Image (spheres, grey):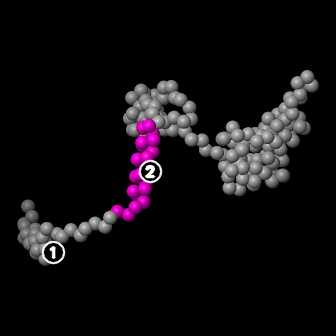
Amino acid sequence: MIWNGRLSTSAGRFRPGSRNPLFPRPAEIEIASYLRDIPDGPAHIRATVLHEMVHYHLWHLKRPYGHTPEFNEILKQVGGTRYNTVPKERKPRHYYRCIGCLKVIPTQRLLKSSACAECCRKYNNNRFTSFYKLERMDEERVAAMMKKAYQQSISAEKPPPPAEKEEPAMPVNEIIRRLEELKEMVGKKKPL
């Protein structure tokens, strides 16, 4: 078993070895290092090792070692799980903004020529149009937007200051008297 600090979207992986007698290489099980730093880490490490050991077992028996029905059956027998529930989330590297709806879209990779899928679907029969092209945002602009969103979320949590009681322009009994006059006038009017 090897700790791998580069695994960030999975908890572990099985790397089959080489059975070539001229270039033998042992099989390896790699476990993501971030599992050591999370709550319930030992339980997740155990589940991941168990999962990868089933891959190893099938490879050793020279059977298909992917996520086959046989793999699932053995995993069920040993009490393992098919998926790990804690993949490490990666911070987006790039941000793009739709020039149509102004929606901000985070991505891991650079986009060459892309458009907002939502706008193209909604306004152009699901076809690409450069009118909704995504423009790349610089880091300073993204940081300013995130700061503004954070400040808005904080201010939304604070209760608004108590409003001052406004006095009506007319006294209440004057408003009631005028409403009664209007009611009498409407009642006296003859239908056409």
Quadrant of residue 185 within the rendered picture: bottom left
Q: Is residue 181 left or right of residue 139?
A: left
Q: Where is mark 1, residue-wise?
A: 172
Q: Relative to the observer, which residue lies in front, 52 or 58?
A: 52
Q: Where is mark 2, residue-wise?
A: 150
Q: Quadrant of the C terminus?
A: bottom left
Q: Relative to the observer, which residue lies in front, 83 or 89?
A: 89
| Percent coordinates x, y for residue 31 in the rendering | 75, 43
Q: Is residue 62 shown to the viewer in this render?
A: yes
- Identify which residue is drawn at 12% across, 70% down: 170
| Percent coordinates x, y for residue 148 in the rendering | 40, 47
Label 1: state its secondary structure.
Answer: helix
| Percent coordinates x, y for residue 189 in the rendering | 7, 67
Residue range of the region highlighted in magenta in the rendering: 140-160
Q: Main secondary structure of the magenta part?
A: helix
Mark 1: few/some/many CA within 10 Å (<14, 14-19, 20+): few
Q: Is residue 176 shown to the viewer in this render?
A: no
Mark 2: few/some/many CA within 10 Å (<14, 14-19, 20+): few
Marks 1 and 2 sit apart, C-alpha to C-alpha, by 44 Å
Q: Earlier in the sequence, mark 1 or mark 2?
A: 2
Q: Which mark is residue 88?
A: none
- Identify which residue is drawn at 71% across, 56% down: 40
Amino acid tagged 1: Val
- Identify which residue is drawn at 25% across, 68% down: 164
